[in-house]
């Protein structure tokens, strides 16, 4: 079932169902996946402000990304070049004065189909911020309400 999302091309949808070895995943999706998995807290972790994260082990993040994309020669230089591409798209930006620290611009990222249970330990819910677009997650709530109405009405997709 495909999820509804804002129609504006200024939004970037995150769909966590991409599988290992999938060449479809984008780097920022992959980073969000690592950030939500406890076993990678020594490698990459949320820090500071809402959406801010630090890459604690850049070589390991690059190695993991290389495995995921089937590119064994991946290194942090190449990975950081890809991250810089996201600056113009306003998906994320580098945190000034902090080495290996970046911040997501969640007002441009739609978290579609994001498992709520995985978010239970995230800093977003702990800070009282809902899952979804920007502060409060109102777009996510609208999508979920529409999905629930469609399920009750027997409509597939949205």
Image: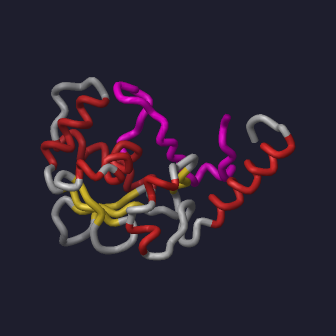
Residue at 32%, 53% (x, y): give it.
35
Q: Position of residue 80 (x, y in %)?
A: 23, 47
Residue at 53%, 62% (x, y): give it.
131
Classify the position of the N terminus by image quarter: top right
Q: Is residue 154 left or right of residue 117?
A: right
**Residue furthest toward the right?**
153
Q: Nearer the viewer, residue 147 or 86?
A: 147
Q: Position of residue 13 (x, y in %)?
A: 54, 47
Predominant secondary structure in magenta? loop
Residue at 66%, 61% (x, y): give it.
141
Residue 2 covered by magenta stretch = yes
Q: Is residue 134 left or right of residue 30?
A: right
What coloring was used for the rendering?
secondary structure
Write down the region rendered in magenta. 1-27
Q: Position of residue 125 (x, y in %)?
A: 46, 69
Classify the position of the C terminus by image quarter: top right
Residue 105 covered by magenta stretch = no
Q: Which quadrant of the view contains residue 122?
A: bottom left
């Amino acid at each position: 079932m495909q999820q509804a999302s804002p129609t504006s091309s200024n939004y970037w949808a995150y769909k966590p169902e991409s599988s290992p070895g999938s060449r479809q995943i984008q780097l920022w999706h992959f980073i969000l996946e690592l950030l939500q998995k406890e076993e990678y807290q020594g490698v990459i972790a949320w820090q500071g402000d809402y959406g801010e994260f630090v890459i604690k082990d850049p070589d390991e993040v690059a190695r993991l990304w290389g495995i995921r994309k089937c590119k064994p020669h991946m290194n942090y230089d190449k990975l950081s070049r890809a991250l810089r591409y996201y600056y113009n798209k306003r998906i994320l930006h580098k945190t000034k004065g902090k080495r290996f620290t970046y911040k997501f611009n969640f007002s441009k990222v739609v978290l579609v189909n994001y498992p709520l249970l995985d978010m239970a330990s995230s800093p977003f819910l702990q800070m009282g911020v809902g899952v979804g677009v920007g502060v409060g997650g109102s777009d996510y709530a609208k999508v979920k309400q529409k999905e629930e109405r469609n399920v009750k009405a027997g409509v597939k997709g949205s």
